[in-house]
Amino acid sequence: MKVSYEYYVDTFKGKICQPEFENLVEPVIDLVKGYAEQFIAPWALEKNIDYYCLELKRAVCYQIDYLQANGGLNALNGTSDLDLQSVSKDGFNYSYGDRGNKFNGVPFSSVSAYMIKSELRRKGLMCRVAKRYDLLSSYFKAFYCYFDS
C-alpha cells in the first residue's frame, strides 16, 4: 500500500505539511496493516496484507492526522499527548478519564478503526469461522463465513 502526499492533500484534503507527512506515513501504514491483521483469522492470514486488496488509504490519512494532533512522531515512540492523566496548579487539580483508543501503545483513531473494520467486513475477512481456499474442493471457490463479527 502506498499513500502519497498528493493523495493526502488533493483527495483527503489533509492539512499537515509534507515533511511531517513523510515522517509519519510509513510507520502509520505499518500500524494500520497491523491493526487490520488482528481481525483476520490466523489460518487465513497471508504474509503480506496487500494480498487482500484492502482499500485503507483514507484510514491511513485519518490516522496520520490523529497522530499529528496527539504528539506526532513522539506518539509512535511511546510519549503521546494522551498519556497526560492529571494537571495540578495552586491547589487546583484536574484528572482525565479515558483519553482515547490505543493500539500497541500508540494512539489510534476511532475513525480509522471503523474504516478498517468496515473494509474487512466488505471483503469477508472479519470471520470467526472460515474455510480456507486450499481446503475447499475444486467445486467451491468462494470464501465462506458463517459468523460475521
Image (tube, rainbow, N blue to C red):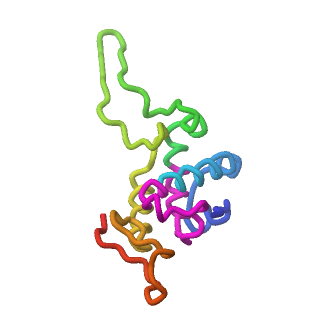
Residue at 45% from the left image edge and 46% from the top image edge = 108
Q: From this viewpoint, which residue is outermost toward the top? A: 90
User: Foreground residue, 57 or 94?
Assistant: 57
Query: Residue 116 in the image: x percent, y percent?
Result: 44, 61
Query: Residue 130 in the image: x percent, y percent?
Result: 38, 69
Which image quadrant for residue 144?
bottom left
Main secondary-structure element of the magenta-colored stretch = helix
Residue at 54% from the left image edge and 36% from the top image edge = 75
Q: Along the horizontal axis of the image, is 10 left or right of 118?
A: right
Q: Along the horizontal axis of the image, is 15 left or right of 97?
A: right
So how many labels did they put on this image? 0
Q: Which residues are magenta?
A: 36-65
Q: Is residue 10 magenta?
A: no
Q: Is residue 55 magenta?
A: yes
Q: Is residue 119 above or below residue 97?
A: below
Which image quadrant for residue 137?
bottom left
Residue at 55% from the left image edge and 51% from the top image edge = 64
Query: Residue 125 in the image: x percent, y percent?
Result: 42, 68
